[in-house]
Image: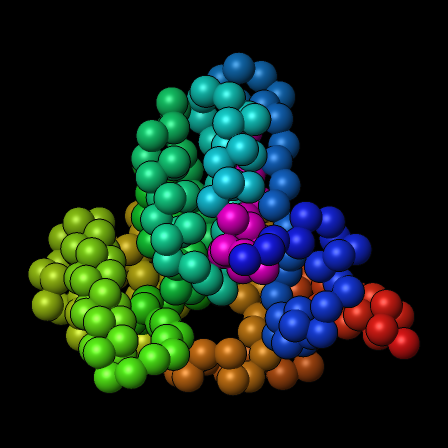
Amino acid sequence: MYKYNSAAARFSSRALLAHAQAGLPQELSTRPRAAADQPAEIYLYDEIGLWGITAKDFTQALLSVGAGPVDLHINSPGGDVFDGLAMYSALQSHDGPVNVIVDGLAASAASFIALAGTTVSMAPNAFLMIHNAWGVVVGNKGDMTDTAGVLTKIDGQLASLYAGKTGQKPDAITQMMDAETWFTAQEAKDAGFIDTILPASQNKAAPTLKAGVFEHQPKPPTNTLSVPDIAARRRTLRLAEAEG
């Protein structure tokens, strides 16, 4: 599969239109340390995987800030589970404390990436979501059965990872994943997924998703225009200009 390496190339495909209209941000950026004892900042504001930020992209960004403390800001709907697991491992191996801050949304793969932090915090209006792994397969009944077996193994691994952070039993986590469970910041803290809730003044992004991206996602507040909404409109305009 081919990854679009430039912003212009990514905006030239109709396959990206659905992503642009979903109201999601699109950014991987870093800010160096102001001093040796100060944290570098990494912003994971995109989908995980081929159409967003790959494990290679993320690992290079993490290496670029060097050893020492890191603040990782997340606003992501998730994506590819294997890229996500590689990002999780890279964070676990980082030479220095990693403080994860969920600014808007940590859903699906982004939810377990967040748990790699030495500390995990959420903005008071942010969301965290866990669910079962998704997959697409074409083939006969044997292919379907094999894929179901792989997805079951993935779900088991993720349930163990969530259980390790929260202290809950894997069976309880499995039930949450089966139900596609959305947590407010307070609910995530009560369930053990995060350590602290940030003051409202430190919030960086609104957890806005357009309707229908996930089955059980909460409804956004009315009469609001978030940073992801603005970014989506700009990307939609670029798509229209490229294909007009």
Identity of the residue drawn at 23% across and 65% down = 150
Task: Residue at 61%, 53% (x, y): give it.
Answer: 3
Residue 120 vs 77, above or below: the answer is above
Q: Total of numbered circles in the picture? A: 0
Q: Residue 14: x, y in percent?
A: 71, 74
Question: Is 160 displayed left or right of 13 in the figure?
Answer: left
Nearest the viewer among 26 and 164 is 26
User: In the picture shown, does residue 134 fall above or below 32?
Assistant: below
**Magenta stretch bounds:** 39-54
The location of residue 81, given as percent across then percent down, is 37, 58
Query: Is residue 213 positioned above or below 107 on the image?
Result: below
Is the C terminus in the top left, top right, bottom left or bottom right quadrant?
A: bottom right
Q: Position of residue 196 (x, y in %)?
A: 35, 49
- The image quadrant that residue 234 belongs to is bottom right
Q: Nearer the viewer, residue 244 or 217?
A: 244
Regarding residue 155, the answer to whether it shows in the image is no
Q: Quadrant of residue 144?
A: bottom left
Q: Residue at x 9, y 61 (%)?
A: 169
Residue 14 visible somewhere in the drawing? yes
Question: At 88% from the left edge and 70% from the top edge, which residue is drawn?
Answer: 241
What's the image's color scheme? Answer: rainbow
Magenta stretch holds residue 180: no
Position of residue 49 measured from the top left corner of the image (x, y, whole percent): 50, 55
